[in-house]
Amino acid sequence: MNAIKKIVMLSIATASFVACSSDDISKSPSPSGGDGVITSLTDPDFNASALKGNIEGNITLVAGTYILDGALVVKNGYTLTIEPGAIIKARPGGTDVYVAVEQGAKIDAEGTATNPILFTSNSGNPRSGDWGGVLLMGYAPISGGGTAITEVVDYVYGGTNNADNSGILSYVIIEYTGARINGEKEFNGLTLYGVGNATTINNIASLYGDDDAIEFFGGTVNVTNLLVVNAKDDMIDWTQGYMGTIDNAYAIREEGFNDVTSDPRGIEADGNLDGNAPTQSGQSNATVTNLTIVSNSIVELSDIIKIRRGSGAIITNAFVSLGNNAPAPADFVDCTDTKGDAATGTTITIAGTGVNLDVNDNKVGVNNATINAASATTGGANITVLAWTGYSF
């Protein structure tokens, strides 16, 4: 039994035990001609076995199992609270199945190390891309200022509040996400649109996503203790003026995981959306510390780290490793792009590397990014604080 299956089975066993004694779930009414708006747990539109609709009340999902049957949208002014041990199992096969937190709304999903919150697929044979994922929209700045509309569904994000608060995600597992609307639009595991730094995002596992594991569209939110396993595209992606920090992240492509997009990367960083606005103010400039990137797959990564299109980055204490049968990436660190190179001041320090890596295979770009790579056997993420996931490192 692989480590990910252990995570799911342990989580389900724990939460199902709690659910057996939960009156809130067992007595939830079935929809009876409702209006698609959930205002309370006694609202006829609330149904734990077919959960969907607009939340327009302060709702709490207690520990137990819920079947997500469509879009669950937390509307402006309201909070969705999810208690430790809750499992949200999404109906597979639909791009209309996701959880969204609008501007001005909050999610309070605060699991624990021993009782995390799980978002997963309801399929008997779960696969990446089974459902959308989790999206948060905030009022923090994006490049160029103003607001924008989300990539996959029509929600507004962006503003002027660096300290905007979209709530809490802590000790949360999100898996089998990335439903694709078309060749250009697809969901990620966790997508943070203009999310502010008063939002708490820590102890997150994003597993088996069909696109990026986590992507930032602008905003200032900080993320701590992140595990990424088998993202089909990029492990970590930011664009459109992201200014936050990522601390202690471990990202891996496992041996045998050979699903791939056209250009999978460890980190893909853009300054402005799609590189089409190089003169915009407020381009991305993120800080990443204590990062491990591992690829044991036979899939070639386009780059271990790609910083481009006006994005800056300060990356310190990174560790990179390839398996014995893994091909070398097209580039180790690449700070160039036809739509603009990395910004002045970009600095990438890699403390250690494994086999098959040419640490000199770097492109510094026109702004002369500083790239330092050593061959130490230590460095990178502290995996002990990710033990709660049950993953076998």
Image: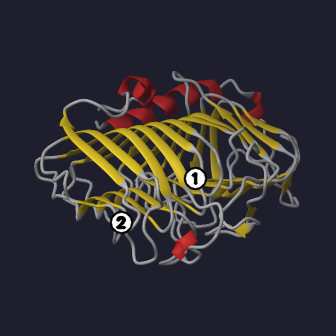
Q: Quadrant of the C terminus?
A: top left
Residue 280 is situated, as x and y percent measured from the top left of the image, at 64, 70
> Circle 1 is placed at which residue position?
90
Q: Give the left or right position of residue 173, taking residue 32 as reference.
A: left
Name the quadrant containing residue 17: top right
Residue 353 is situated, as x and y percent measured from the top left of the image, at 21, 41
Label 2 Cα neighbours within 10 Å, binned few <14 / some 14-19 / many ≥20: some
Q: Give the left or right position of residue 68, taking residue 54 as reference.
A: left
Check disc 1 and report its element: helix, strand or loop. strand
> Circle 2 is placed at which residue position?
365
Identify the residue at horizontal 38%, vertical 23% (top origin): 384
Identify the residue at horizontal 71%, vertical 27% (top origin): 22
In the image, is residue 65 above or below residue 127? Answer: above
Residue 209 is situated, as x and y percent measured from the top left of the image, at 44, 55
Identify the residue at horizontal 76%, vertical 29% (top origin): 23
Closer to the camera in the image, 381 or 154: 381
Using the image, tell me which numbered label, if any, was put on residue 346.
none
